[in-house]
Structure formats: C-alpha cells, structure tokens
Image (spheres, rainbow, N blue to C red):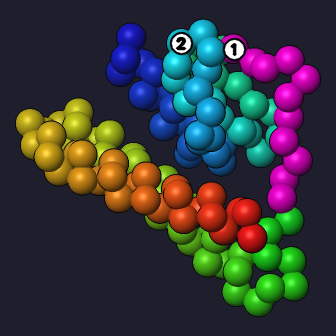
C-alpha cells in the first residue's frame, strides 16, 4: 500500500499539484493543492469540506520573483521524486535522507517566499 501511495503522490506532483505542509486527519499523509485550487489527500481521497485555496499571484510587479519561485518549486519536486526513486532502488538510505532533507529545505524557502 505504501508504494501505491508514493506513486499517487508522485503523479499528483507531476500533474502540477502542490504538496502542502498540512496532513490528512484520516491517514496522516500530506495534503495536496491542485491547480484548480481544490485540496485533497491522494492517499485516502479525503477532501476538507469547503476548503480551497486561491492561487497566489506571486511576484506581480516584482521582476524575476516568479521565475525564482517557479525554479525553486520545480527543483524541490525533482528532488523529492529523486529521493523516492533512490529509496526504492537502493539500499543507500543515507543518500535518500539527504535528498529529502534538501527537498524540505527548498520547501521551507518556498514557504518564506510565499509569505513575502
């Protein structure tokens, strides 16, 4: 079941969804915000009642800010996917943990950028 959930999460990220810091109250998996603003748990299908998030207009009138934000977001997604791939194909758990740690650092920077 865990591999199935990882596949679902990877597919959500590849389809443009954003992994949120909030966890599902039913299964404790991360929640995802989809491009249409809807939020759901891809692991168990739970959807918060009436909760959507409007897309932020990040960087409007701020020069290269959207480019930097999008580049960091893309890098974090790729790093997370690489960590999943390494964890599945290798016994080198330390490398997978390093990649996950790097991904979390990038995600924290993204959160800081969103709050500007």
Q: Residues within 10 Å of mark 1 (few under 14, many from 20)?
A: some
**What residue sits right under mark 2 in the picture?**
27
Residue 46 shows which numbered tag? Answer: 1
Residue 8 is left or right of residue 65, and the answer is: left
Compare marks 1 and 2 and give the one earlier in the sequence.
Answer: 2
Q: Is residue 14 above or below residue 22?
A: below
At x 40%, y 48%, the residue is 80
54 part of magenta stretch: yes
Q: Are marks 1 and 2 in contact (CB under 8 Å)?
A: yes
Depth check: give the residue in front, 26 or 86: 26
At x 51%, y 32%, the residue is 9
Depth check: give the residue in front, 80 or 51: 51
Q: Nearer the viewer, mark 1 or mark 2?
A: 2
Magenta extent: 46-56
Q: Secondary structure at mark 1?
A: loop
Per the picture, the main secondary structure of the magenta-coloured stretch is loop
Q: Residues within 10 Å of mark 2 (few under 14, many from 20)?
A: few
């Amino acid at each position: 079941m865990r591999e199935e959930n990882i596949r679902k999460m990877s597919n959500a990220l590849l389809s443009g969804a954003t992994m949120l810091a909030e966890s599902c109250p039913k299964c404790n998996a991360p929640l995802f915000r989809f491009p249409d603003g809807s939020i759901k748990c891809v692991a168990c299908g739970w959807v918060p009642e009436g909760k959507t998030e409007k897309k932020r207009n990040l960087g409007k009138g701020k020069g290269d800010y959207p480019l930097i934000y999008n580049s960091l977001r893309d890098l974090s997604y790729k790093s997370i996917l690489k960590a999943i791939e390494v964890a599945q194909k290798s016994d080198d758990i330390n490398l997978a943990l390093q990649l996950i740690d790097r991904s979390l650092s990038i995600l924290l920077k993204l959160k800081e950028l969103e709050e500007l």
